[in-house]
């Protein structure tokens, strides 16, 4: 059986480190899109089940060789396909140590250090985001599980208000929960409702405007007609446009109606940290729970997200896993697993603590401001080109673009799809595709910590060049 004796650890890990450094050094010079698609990558990895072990160093070399052609470049300066942070080197280093330390962050006895890092990082995050200081935070994989956990606390609280213990009795026979949610809410919010047994189709869907923001008048009518138990889901940073719901109006109205308010703020919630963008979230701190990602503007490595719940006790009630072999704190030690769905879990607090220490408030503000300014720059550069239309008000870091504005919808859809494909094939930058209000569009998301004005201009020029090539083709 293959094994790794202690004396072999250093050479093995050094090889991994050298491969990682080589990749990151090469990223600015790589084509933005992977060289291999899924089929080619699968063909490379495909093999019969190994009956005998192999030398770890040889296996690692094969992994690097096989994976490299199919790797995306979200760590580079010209990746705009999705809202994915650049995995800052400091966070990666902390994440490497987290893996090497092999800690299970389930409770304070299994890893006192992991629990302590989360405790301090939680306090820092609440200060950075200026959310209620008494709130609790769970360190989860990302916004999907953050939305799930926040809405699990919501489900528990609103049913408890009408005399139903969902943790004990489940949903069979429970009073039905009314959920109000915008029609352009993120898919992960709908997924969380599905997983929690609340149903993604039985919600009350609220109309939105051309920026994906919930129409206030319609929402107020729906809120006025609410019967408890009820949950209202709002959004900070719509995925395609970056738009924000009107928290200052909708949060107090929903609370007055007895509803729990949950905010999906995967990347938009970070706008609270900057004086230039903070007004977008006015009133959001009045909600009951929030979802936000670390692997976006905080630039932590994947995976890292946070769920924030105003009421610590309700948060723990919805998530705590109890068993005879698990420790019970009698002196206030924080057990990370009391705030997330998992018992066995990665110690994400180490990378979070490291990134907040590395960037500080000023560093995060600088990133948010720079990325928003670069998004406006890209929008201006594209908006001035014939046949190119910017569909959104660029209030944050998202630019939504339509090609063929001088053509009918079908031709515009074709030009948009082909422009996106050509941009990716040219390899200068990587952009995303989406469907917005029934039409195809390109999404340009600025969030990598290495992206600067030169890279933004270069990428905008690549998009224009690609569109001109598309229009020149028969």
Image (cartoon, helix red, strand yellow):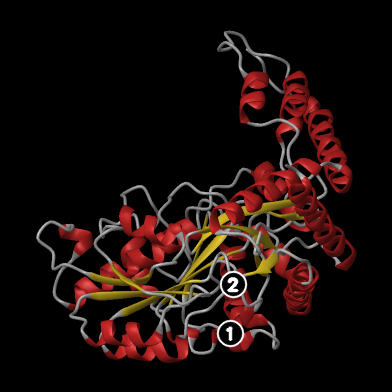
Q: Are marks 1 and 2 in contact (CB under 8 Å)?
A: no
Residue furthest left in the image? 173
CA distance separating discs 1 and 2: 10 Å
Residue 170 image position (x, y, % from top left)? 18, 57
Q: Is residue 60 visible?
A: yes
Secondary element under disc 1, as helix, strand or loop, is helix
Residue 13 higher or lower than 21, as above or below: above
Q: Which mark is residue 242?
A: 2
Residue furthest top in the image? 51
Q: Quadrant of residue 37?
A: top right
Q: Where's the C terminus, which quadrant?
A: top right
Taking the spot 58% from the left edge, 85% from the top edge, the residue there is 280
Closer to the camera, 354 or 442?
A: 442
Left of 438 or right of it: where is 25?
Answer: right
Secondary element under disc 2, as helix, strand or loop, is loop
Q: Which mark is residue 363?
A: none
Whichever of callouts 1 and 2 sits on the residue coming sooner in the sequence is 2
Q: Nearer the viewer, mark 1 or mark 2?
A: 2
Left of 158 or right of it: where is 113?
Answer: right
Taking the spot 39% from the left edge, 79% from the top edge, the residue there is 288
Closer to the camera, 391 or 21?
A: 391
Residue located beneath label 1 in the image:
280
Q: Where's the N terminus, which quadrant?
A: top right
Residue 295 image position (x, y, % from top left)? 64, 59
Residue 169 higher or lower than 69, as above or below: below
Q: Quadrant of residue 129?
A: bottom right
Closer to the camera, 147 or 451?
A: 451
């Amino acid at each position: 059986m293959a094994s790794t004796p202690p004396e072999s650890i250093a050479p093995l890990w050094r090889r991994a480190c050298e491969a990682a450094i080589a990749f990151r050094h090469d990223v600015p010079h790589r084509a933005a899109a992977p060289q291999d698609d899924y089929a080619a990558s699968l063909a490379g990895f495909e093999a019969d089940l190994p009956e005998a072990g192999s030398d770890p160093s040889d296996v690692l070399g094969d992994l690097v060789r096989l994976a490299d052609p199919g790797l995306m470049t979200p760590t580079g300066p010209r990746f705009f396909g999705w809202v994915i942070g650049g995995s800052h080197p400091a966070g990666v280093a902390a994440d490497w140590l987290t893996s090497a330390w092999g800690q299970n962050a389930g409770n304070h006895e299994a890893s006192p250090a992991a629990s302590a890092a989360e405790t301090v990082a939680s306090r820092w995050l609440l200060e950075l985001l200026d959310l209620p200081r008494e709130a609790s935070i769970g360190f989860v994989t990302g916004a999907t599980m953050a939305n799930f956990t926040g809405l699990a606390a919501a489900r528990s609280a609103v049913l408890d208000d009408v005399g139903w213990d969902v943790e004990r009795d489940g949903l069979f026979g429970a009073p039905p929960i009314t959920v109000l949610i915008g029609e352009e809410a993120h898919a992960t919010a709908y997924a969380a409702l599905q997983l929690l047994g609340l149903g993604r189709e039985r919600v009350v869907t609220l109309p939105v405007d051309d920026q994906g923001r919930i129409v206030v008048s319609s929402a107020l009518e729906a809120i006025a007609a609410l019967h408890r138990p009820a949950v209202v889901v709002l959004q900070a940073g719509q995925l395609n446009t970056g738009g924000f719901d009107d928290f200052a109006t909708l949060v107090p109205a929903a609370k007055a109606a007895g509803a729990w308010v949950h905010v999906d703020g995967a990347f938009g919630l970070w706008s609270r940290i900057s004086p230039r963008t903070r007004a977008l979230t006015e009133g959001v701190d009045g909600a009951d729970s929030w979802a936000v990602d670390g692997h976006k503007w905080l630039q932590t490595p994947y995976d890292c997200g946070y769920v924030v719940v105003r009421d610590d006790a309700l948060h723990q009630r919805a998530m705590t896993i109890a068993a005879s072999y698990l420790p019970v704190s009698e002196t206030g030690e924080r057990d990370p697993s009391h705030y997330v769905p998992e018992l066995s879990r990665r110690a994400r607090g180490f990378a979070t603590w490291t990134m907040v220490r590395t960037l500080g408030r000023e560093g995060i503000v600088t990133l948010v401001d720079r990325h928003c300014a670069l998004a406006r720059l890209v929008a201006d550069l594209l908006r001035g080109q014939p046949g190119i239309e910017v569909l959104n008000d660029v209030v944050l870091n998202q630019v939504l673009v339509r090609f063929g504005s001088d053509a009918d919808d079908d031709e515009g859809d074709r030009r948009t799809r082909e422009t996106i494909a050509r941009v990716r094939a040219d390899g200068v930058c990587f952009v995303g595709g989406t469907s917005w209000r029934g039409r195809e569009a390109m999404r340009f998301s600025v969030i990598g910590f290495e992206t600067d004005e030169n890279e933004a201009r270069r990428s905008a020029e690549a998009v224009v060049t690609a569109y001109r090539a598309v229009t020149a083709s028969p």
